[in-house]
Image (spheres, rainbow, N blue to C red):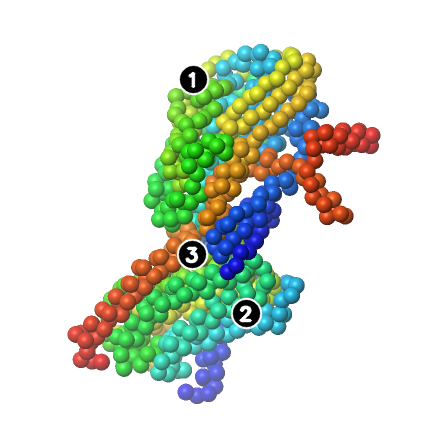
Amino acid sequence: MDPILLAVYILVFPGFVFLLGYAFLFEFLDRKIYARMQNRVGPPLVQPFADFVKMLGKEVIDPKGVDRRAFDVAPILALAAVMTAFLYVPVVASSPLAFQGDLVVVLYLMTIPTIVLFLLGWLSRNVYATIGGVRAVTQMFIYEVPFYLAMLAPALMAGAAGGWSVSGIVAWQQHNLWFAVYQPIGLVVAIIGLQAKLERTPFDIPEAETEIVAGPTTELTGRRLALMKLTTDVSLVVGSALVAALFLGGPLLPWTFSPNWLGWTVGFVVFLAKTLAVLLVLSSIKAATGRIRIDQLNDIGWKYLASAAVLQVFLALLMNYYLVGANA
Amino acid sequence: MAEVIVPVGPQHPALKEPVNFKVVADGETIVRLELDVSYNHRGIEKAAESRDFVRVVPLLERVCGICSHSHTTVFTKGIEEAMKLTIPPRAQYIRTIVAELERMHSHLLWLGVAAHEVGFNTLFMWTWRDREAVQDMLEEMTGNRVNYGTNEVGGVRRDLTPEQIQAALKRLPKLEERLAKYAEMVNAEETMLLRFKGVGHLTKEQALQLGAVGPTARASGVDYDIRRDDPYIAYADIPWKVITDTHGDVYGRTLVRVGELQQSLEMIRYCLQNLPAGPIRTAPPRAAPRAEILTRYEAPRGELVHFIRTNNTDKVERLDIRTPTLANWTSVAVSLVNQNLADIPVIVAAIDPCLSCTSRITVVNPKGRHVGEMTWDELSEHGREFYRRRGRR
């Protein structure tokens, strides 16, 4: 690919500029759907962006005895990680940066915000933040295994053709059915895992407002808080896009369109539709539930989610052997 | 994690009330807690001694932002008992209507708060929306949403017109439908059941031993309700039943409150439909004879007690207020031990704490960093000094 085009891809569309805009739109839609389900009016369209700008301008307060530089760097690290992850997720067509095994990289990059939250909680020297940080990591150990298994099951089934790459798995689905059809259990586990990863109700345990104020972000102010909030929004986009890519066929349709620009436009519209559908499901879960306790999540996660994910992997291997074995 | 002290309050998102817990937690488990409720002593009992029976009622209405009618009713009924007045039935019915509307708005508020404490904000928004209907009814009837100004010694201050009664009756079916919905949700919402069942357990023996009152006690199987056991205003004439439950946990307290909501609605409907004709007040004498009265009332949070001593003047010589929250605090301290850190907000909320009415005084000397209590004599001396200085200014 032309280096200039590649730079445009990374920096403008569908890279960082689009990603940030879409993240703000996602937060708006999430809040709006949530509000309408609660019979409230909800925020205006530009509210997330206005919040972000306002928070950037607010005073940055360093709590006593806190490593200031680490506190500055941590939110940037988290944001950089999830933004990088988005580059490997197909938006209009296959990602030009795709390589064999990029799915694993994406999943690892998406874990970094959680680690950063733990770090922030630990650095804060504040009891609420510390408890929040410990909860964030505890929760990670619970959802991460089923979530990874569910996300990797499509890669297993796509096999060498998929190449353990998000774009490859999307391309595989162009010629076959969506993975949502082959692996419905995996889709459910992935969506629940994603909800837990993004720390949204019923899994907002690390930042449970009524218990531990704001959890790990309690001591964050100004641009640090703004960047951490933006990280959450971007994670929401990346997570939804990843589920859309792995289970719902991503931006590709079974048909190819003759001029490239038409294909890209159709792909982009399909991408928007699918990610918004995933968001609708996530927001509905958020509105329909209360917060469970960490010990209850432990039970649910290891007893049911992990078992379901293992079952799905097993079924995927069986299907590989009997159904798709020929083309793989 | 080793044992840590988690401070909760007086500024904390879960409890927007002036209270402080020092929770000693081992990881996520609560080992013990220290409780400090003395942040907002307002000296209302003392202030009540300096106002006559006309002016003391609006003051007592401000003891609590939610049970405002409870405090005035319990006080006026005590004074009326001392004066040996017979209150016209119409006034008693109007008092009952306002009292039950108050219970409804308090319980709906509680249900929302309890849901919010476990992060279920959708139910929180819904109940508070429906609570608006109750508040609108109160506003239509009394002119105010919170401090209704309905009571005075000898009766009530405002009559209900037939239009007001019709308007109130028209609102009830919609409210009834919503209450049925909440009764169903309480038993069906999975995350609520997970967070409410078995949490903050209090046995019947503990409830009796610790003197728990109101829905907290009734949820532990203590069949005790002042409205039935010591009937006042119009409760003896109205068909209704006491709601009890044997779960003893937050779930049980929710069931009791939702049941009471439905009972209250029926009581309001009955009172509105069978409102007796006649005057709404009798002229009380100016002074009350020497007497000592202990008057009780079933406030939304439980048994509210006013002790009144009168001395042939138009002022009380002594007024002592025992709010239900004060009676319920000890049960919280017991039911929190060995529970999860995450359960603090919902267990505390389950007694429906109302703290400014509960606060007792603590003296803080900022220079010497000294915190202590005041004896009764010191307090009265302080009170006399304070008002003397104020009088001089």
Asked if residue A261 shows in the view, the reply is: no
Quick one: which residue is furthest to the bottom in this view? A2
Look at mark 1 in the image and give the residue it sits on: B237
Look at mark 2 in the image and give the residue it sits on: A75
- Left or right of residue B236: residue A244: left
Marks 2, 3: nearer the viewer: 3
Q: Position of residue B313 (x, y in %)?
A: 69, 15
Q: Quick one: SS at disc 3?
A: helix
Q: Amino acid at mark 1?
A: Asp
Determine the residue positioned at 55% across, 65% down.
A122
Q: Which is more N-terminal, label 3 or label 2?
A: 2
Q: CA distance from mark 2 to mark 1?
A: 65 Å
How busy is the neighbourhood of tag 1: few (under 14 within 10 Å), some, or many (20 plus)? few
Q: Give the letter of the chain under mark 3.
A: A
Camera-side residue: B123 or A115?
A115
Q: Amino acid at mark 2?
A: Pro
Q: Amino acid at mark 3?
A: Ile
Q: Quick one: SS at disc 1?
A: helix
Look at mark 3 in the image and give the residue it sits on: A294
Q: Position of residue B302 (x, y in %)?
A: 50, 31
Asked if marks 3 and 1 fall on the same chain, the answer is no
Determine the residue positioned at 52% across, 47% down.
B32
Determine the residue positioned at 40% across, 55% down.
A295
Marks 3, 1: nearer the viewer: 3
Q: Give the letter of the chain under mark 1.
A: B
Asked if marks 2 and 1 fall on the same chain, the answer is no
Q: Give the letter of the chain under mark 2.
A: A
Determine the residue positioned at 67% across, 35% down.
B42
Q: Position of residue B362 (x, y in %)?
A: 67, 39
Camera-side residue: B68 or B202?
B202
Q: CA distance from mark 2 to mark 3?
A: 25 Å
